[in-house]
Image: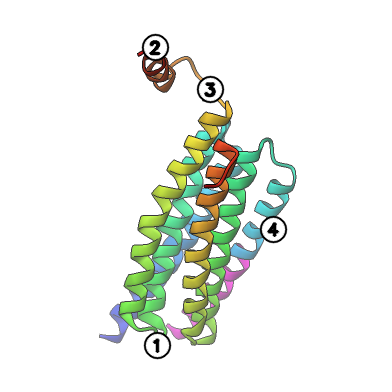
Amino acid sequence: MDQIIANVLNLALLVHLLLLGIVVWRVWRGENVIDRLAGADLVATLTMAILILLALVRQDSLYVEVALGLAALGFVGILALARYLADEQMF
Amino acid sequence: MEIVGQTLTLLALLGGTFFSVVGVLGYLRLPDVYTRLHATGKVGVFGVVLLLVAAIFWTPLSPGLGLLFMALLLLAGPVTGHALSSAAYRIGLRPQGKRDDLARRLEKMNNR
């Protein structure tokens, strides 16, 4: 059972890395600015997922704390950028 | 008792990966900004939360930190989606299709 979980973990890590590459390519040739901003948010979310999978592979919970910091900072950044795009001023 | 934790870990891993794949497929294939935002929300709210369930069962992560992370994700996902779609409407991107309820509402507010 441990071997099965280790194999599934490696497969999930590979799938998430592939998805990250695809989304970065899609942001590069995005249609409009909100599309690209949503793609950047998706890149941050997939990075969180990869960090949590690394915590599972390495058996180390420090990676989850790094992902928590990334989630908090990314949330504030996306909100500020969305407001800047809509109102052309941030405050 | 060990087998229960292992089975839950396996199911949560497979479910989280499934939702990540579905969200990215939706981001690639759906036609306009609003439907794409609907798809990308799934990755944060279902994919990462299910991976966190697996991490709580399978690593020496304290459950309190995992629950805090889940609460942050469940709060941040809808707020981010709302902010992005509101910004898209105010920039001037209109949804596909004939029906546009927000346009009538904005017109009524401007005439008042």
- Residue bearing mark 1: B60
Q: In this rendered view, identify the residue nearer to me: A72 or B61.
A: A72
**Can you say whether B24 is above or below A44 in the image?**
above
Amino acid at dot 4: Gly
Q: Secondary structure at mark 2?
A: helix
User: Which chain is disc 4 placed on?
Assistant: A
Q: Eyeballing the image, is A61 above or below B98?
A: below
- Residue that carries the numbered disc 4 in the rendered image: A21
Q: Residue at x 49, y 37 (%)?
A: B85
Dot 2 or dot 1: first in sequence order is 1
Can you identify the residue that label 3 sits on? B96
Q: Residues within 10 Å of mark 1 (few under 14, many from 20)?
A: some
Type of the residue with mark 1:
Pro
The alpha-carbon separation of the residues under discs 2 and 1 comes to: 60 Å
Q: Give the CA separation, mark 1 to mark 4.
A: 30 Å
The answer for which chain carries disc 1 is B
- Bounds of the magenta segment: A1-15
Residue B51: in magenta span: no
Q: Residue at x 31, y 79 (%)?
A: B63
Q: Are marks 4 and 2 in contact (CB under 8 Å)?
A: no
- SS type, badge 4: helix
Q: Is residue A6 visible?
A: no
Secondary structure, magenta segment, majority class: helix
